[in-house]
Image: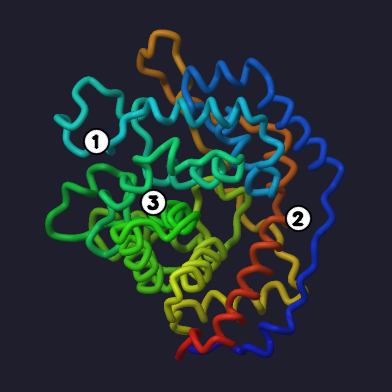
């Protein structure tokens, strides 16, 4: 399958107007992040609860291009608190005796999504959290992917990597300088992983068979992403990867997605098709770190305002425009190949 480049180039690049409700939501989240309550929440737990803690407000502001509004003391507190988490991803019980696997350790997609936020806030993440990019290298699987399920690393007969666990680390790895040879090799292999999946295929393995069912939903675009995957997010990072690494991008790896997006959004305006965050549960912080029962996850005004089904998405529209422009640059450079 090939891409009709003339049709791709003909798609306009509009900028949907931001509603007053979204503007109020941005102001509300910025005010919350500047509060003592936000700092106390980060100190108690940097990640939980979903979706209404500083972590999620910060991620969403970044996705909207508003990371510059995140108060500096809050981004600094988040970086410092992340640095107090385990600097490893426990796979065996002996890796971190006595640790709470959900509270004391990050996962690949969590680190991958927060890394760009902190960088956009002006933090030198490579200096402040120098262990994060080597973490991604350490836990890359044989096929170039990663998996936030620690039991996936115990499988010896197959490689049950995950799209959700792979894309955010690759996004983070493409930021900043080229990095070490190991980090460049990581990016090359992760890009190969996405191409092998053609952005749309779930895992072929037994251990991660659930992903094959989840893949049905990937073609419906979601916002906010947080750590979730859809085909536009995959396309955007793969185009960035090809440009940053000066690799050739086979049309066959992206054509199914590109052609479908051109047909679905001929005016260039992308609308929210899925609420990936809806219906999820969360851990709740406890004063004595006792086990917490899971509870329904709560939302906040900005999250509600930008995730309404059928509404134009400023962020998704911008990402689709940038991906199209990148594809056309690759084509002109002779690096979008059949």
For disc 3, the neighbor class at 10 Å (few under 14, some 14 to 19, many from 20) is many
Q: CA distance from mark 2 to mark 1?
A: 40 Å
Residue at figure coordinates x 66%, y 78% from the top left: 262
How far across and how far down the image is residue 110, in percent? Answer: 44, 41
Which is more toward the observer, 235 or 189? 189
Secondary structure under the numbered disc 2 in the rendered image: loop
- Say which label, 3 or 1, has the lower sequence index: 1
Q: Is residue 59 visible?
A: yes
**Relative image position of residue 2 (x, y in whole percent):** 52, 89
Which numbered marker is on residue 311? 2
| SS under mark 3 | helix
Instruction: Determine the CA span between mark 3 and mark 1.
Output: 15 Å
Quadrant (top left/top right/bottom left/bottom right) for the C terminus = bottom left
* Position of residue 105 in the picture relative to residue 329 (left or right): left
**Label of residue 90 in the image:** 1
Image color mode:
rainbow
Q: Residues within 10 Å of mark 2 (few under 14, many from 20)?
A: some
Q: Taking 269 as reference, is 141 above or below it?
A: above
**Residue 209 visible (yes or no):** no
Q: For the residues labelled 3 and 1, say whether their Cβ atoms are less than 8 Å apart.
A: no
Specify the label residue 165 is tagged with: 3
Quote the CA–CA distance across marks 3 and 2.
28 Å
- Residue 234 left/right relative to 37: left
């Amino acid at each position: 399958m090939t891409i009709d480049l003339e049709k791709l180039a003909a798609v306009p690049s509009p900028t949907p107007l931001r509603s007053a409700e979204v503007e109020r939501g941005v102001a509300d989240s910025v005010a919350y992040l500047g509060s003592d309550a936000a700092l106390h929440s980060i100190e108690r737990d940097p990640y939980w609860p979903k979706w209404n803690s500083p972590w999620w407000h910060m991620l969403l502001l970044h996705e909207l291009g508003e990371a510059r509004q995140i108060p500096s003391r809050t981004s600094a507190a988040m970086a410092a608190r992340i640095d107090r988490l385990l600097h490893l991803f426990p796979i065996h019980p002996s890796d971190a005796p006595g640790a709470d696997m959900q509270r004391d350790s990050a996962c690949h997609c969590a680190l991958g999504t927060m890394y760009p936020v902190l960088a956009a806030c002006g933090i030198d993440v490579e200096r402040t959290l120098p262990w994060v990019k080597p973490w991604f290298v350490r836990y890359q699987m044989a096929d170039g992917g990663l998996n936030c399920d620690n039991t996936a690393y115990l499988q010896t007969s197959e490689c049950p990597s995950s799209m959700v666990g792979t894309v955010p680390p690759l996004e983070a790895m493409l930021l900043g300088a080229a990095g070490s040879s190991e980090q460049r090799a990581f990016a090359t292999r992760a890009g190969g992983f996405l191409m092998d999946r053609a952005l749309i295929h779930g895992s072929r393995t037994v251990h991660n068979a659930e992903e094959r069912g989840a893949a049905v939903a990937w073609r419906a675009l979601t916002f906010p992403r947080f750590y979730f995957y859809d085909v536009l997010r995959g396309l955007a990072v793969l185009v960035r990867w090809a440009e940053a690494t000066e690799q050739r991008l086979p049309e066959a790896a992206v054509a199914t997605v590109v052609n479908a997006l051109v047909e679905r959004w001929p005016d260039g305006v992308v609308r929210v098709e899925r609420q990936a965050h809806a219906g999820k549960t969360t851990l709740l912080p406890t004063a004595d770190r006792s086990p917490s029962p899971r509870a329904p996850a709560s939302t906040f005004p900005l999250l509600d305002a930008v995730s309404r089904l059928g509404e134009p998405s400023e962020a998704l529209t911008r990402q689709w425009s940038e991906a199209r422009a990148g594809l056309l640059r690759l084509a002109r450079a002779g690096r979008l190949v059949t």
